[in-house]
Amino acid sequence: MSSSHETIISNEISRYNPRRSQRYSTVHVLLIRWKDDDIGVADEVKQLAQLFRDKFNFFVWPYQIPTENSQVELYLHIAQFIQRCGSENDNLIILHYSGHGGRTADLMNSECVWSAKISGGPTVDWAIIQPGILGAGCDVAILLDCCFAGQAVRSRFQHNVEFLAATDKDQFTPTGNLANRPSFTKVLIELLDLVAAESSNITILELHRQMLRKEAGLVKQPFYASLSRSSSVAGIRLARWEPLDATVVKAVSSTPSDREDSVSLYLRLSLFQPMDMEQREALIRWLTRDSPSDIEHIQILQRTISEAQAVGQVSSEILCPKIVAPNVPPQLRISDDTREEAKRLTRSLTHVLSIPETYQFADLDVRQIIKSISERSDQLLAFMNDCIAGLNEESLDTFRNQDLYGTFELESRIAMRLTLVQDEVMKGAIKLYLDNTTLTDQRLRIGRKEEDSVLVEYWEYETMGNEDVSKSRDQAARISALLIEDKAKAFRILPGLGYVEETIRPRIGFVYRLPSGISTDDYWTLSELIGTVKALPLEVRFQLASTICDAILHLHSIGWFHKAIKSENIIILRNLHNTLREASSHKFYDFDNPYVIGFDCSRPSQTESRLTVDFSVKNNIYRHPERWGTPKPFERKHDIYALGILLLEIGCWRPLPSMDGSRKGFESVKKPERLRDTLLEIVRTKLAHSAGSKYCEAVAFCLEEREWTTEEPWQTQRRVRQKVWQPLKMSI
């Protein structure tokens, strides 16, 4: 198999692995009953809706079939539902009907008819409804609690459709009004409630098996059918749905192979002929969506080894070369400490890769070897990422031309670093349409660029002379080029589209593309939400803090200092996965995915620092003591201190000025070191009580005075990662 095919297959498997526990990117439930019936199913359907919504986190859409024009109204509603919720391949649709069911009037047709009343009243014909449902572009689970439900089963040609009904095609089913004759829906609720209580999952087929047990109490045998064309298609599995970011966190924190009860199989696949694109897509499908539902994780081991070998080779050639070029100035050479650390990590990786081909090992050996290779490769790769800021342009170009075997994050950081250090950068403002409903002098505005919704972040520049204007434009162009670069999600920066320049006033605005579905009223700064959103759970605060800390580490790894880390430069969007409309609830906001803005003051670490004089205590309380008044040149430690202030606000969930015991917002503080001492006292007392000792120690590390100048950038990065980010991450 060629390396390109292997890379694509491996990337698709890695993308899908976090979804294996639940399989679907979104789950929509359509609950159908009659508006006016004679058996009273409303309470049971309401319970089922609450179960799916609260215990499984599914999107629930109740619908009552009207008495008038029933067939057409239901047909149109289902068509709209399929268009809105069933067009994405990775979705799951669950359709549940509770009510009367029967055969057609002539008794010759095997189709199922739904009716509002046991005799007379409106009816709908399943034969007309079925094609719309089976035309969905995703998997469908059909749950029918009605008589003669089995008659609704028909063949299909695409995707996976599973059918679970109260009875087969020739049977009546209890209404559930008698205690010893529970309805199909009541038993369904009880079984799914047990699954949710155990934080487990269940296939539709297993659900059917559970219903067949005597203890379930059903007097009629439920009916199951899979309507998929292929018998190898994995069954539909019901599990609590979580947004992808949450499942990724869980997957990373608990690798399946680490569990003692995990069973691993190691397979080698051989193809009859060279792989083409059609075969590759079929193989991807087989390893992802069509894999058995009991498979928790799939990994291409050869790719793990190949990536590790590539990382080790690049480290040997770039970070620890045998011959140092004589024409490289001393300040641009790789330091001895860096070279020795690179050698140590490279030797450690080479050691685990040096396994004789004839070596025979047991299953446990394979697991441990692959784990060791991955861990040591990740350690070396993290070190290489942190070294990028210290490399000269020639080394970066050499780095970029190496075969990095799909290590996107390293490649993107190299490209970003080159954007910072190269002299030439593309200039020129872009054009876009701005939302007129917002005030024109606002710092943040919503607009559109072609089909994209955009956020524009404005900043004002000095106009004392043509040189100031030129510098501001140069800075805007360089920062904008950085924001446009492809980057890892961990940078927590919205995709950049360019910048705009106002002609009425001296303002430049960075343009960010917003996620689909976000509108004018769907974004807030963190400073607006701190204290406003009540009772933010501790685990949400830990997740928010660790994500922001990781973003700053990523920014520093390419040698870029933010210079204005504070809550007003963190953007929180509306949670598109939650249907709540209560703005006071934390679930209304997507705290798991904050975004960093405020790059107007940021700069590469080697460039001249803008020494803007500012004696405003209101602004200075967020800054390192050396940056008060007439500031010293900006250093990495100044960003780390500001990060500590932000983490303090998140941990206490209070804005910084409100922590002043004198209720003056620290306005009376004249000596910056005195404020540092006060904040450290708050950390050791109030923060420890609010967020725990580990969080307290992480914040204190950022705020305390310590010697940073003697360290290499990668050494500082490592210390912050160990002392701040890891404790925050472990607290989640």
Image: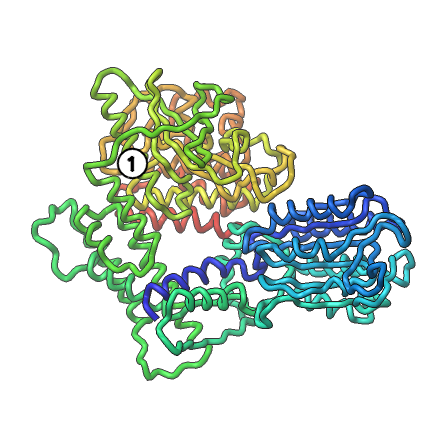
Q: Is residue 685 visible?
A: no
Question: Residue 278: x percent and y percent?
Answer: 42, 66
Q: Nearer the viewer, residue 94 or 325?
A: 94
| In the displayed structure image, the side of residue 585 where residue 303 appears, left or right | left
Question: Residue 63: x percent and y percent?
Answer: 74, 45
Q: Nearer the viewer, residue 710 or 211?
A: 211
In the displayed structure, would residue 567 be above or below residue 462?
A: below
Q: Find the residue positioned furthest to the left.
A: 326
Q: How many numbered marks are there?
A: 1
As shown in the figure, which amino acid type bears the numbered disc 1? Answer: Glu
**Residue beneath the point at 41% across and 64% down:** 9
Q: Residues within 10 Å of mark 1 (few under 14, many from 20)?
A: some
Q: Nearer the viewer, residue 244 or 272?
A: 272
Query: Which secondary structure, mark 1?
Result: loop
| In the displayed structure image, the side of residue 556 where residue 448 appears, left or right | right
| In the displayed structure image, the side of residue 61 where residue 490 appears, left or right | left
Question: Residue 43: x percent and y percent?
Answer: 82, 48
In the displayed structure, would residue 450 be above or below residue 617?
A: below
Q: Is residue 262 visible?
A: yes
In the displayed structure, would residue 497 be above or below residue 693?
A: above
Where is mark 1, residue-wise? 635
Q: Nearer the viewer, residue 151 or 295?
A: 151
**Figure quadrant of residue 224:** bottom right
**Residue beneath the point at 29% across and 26% down:** 631
Image quarter of the N terminus: bottom left
| In the displayed structure image, the side of residue 63 where residue 320 appears, left or right | left
Question: Residue 178: x percent and y percent?
Answer: 92, 58
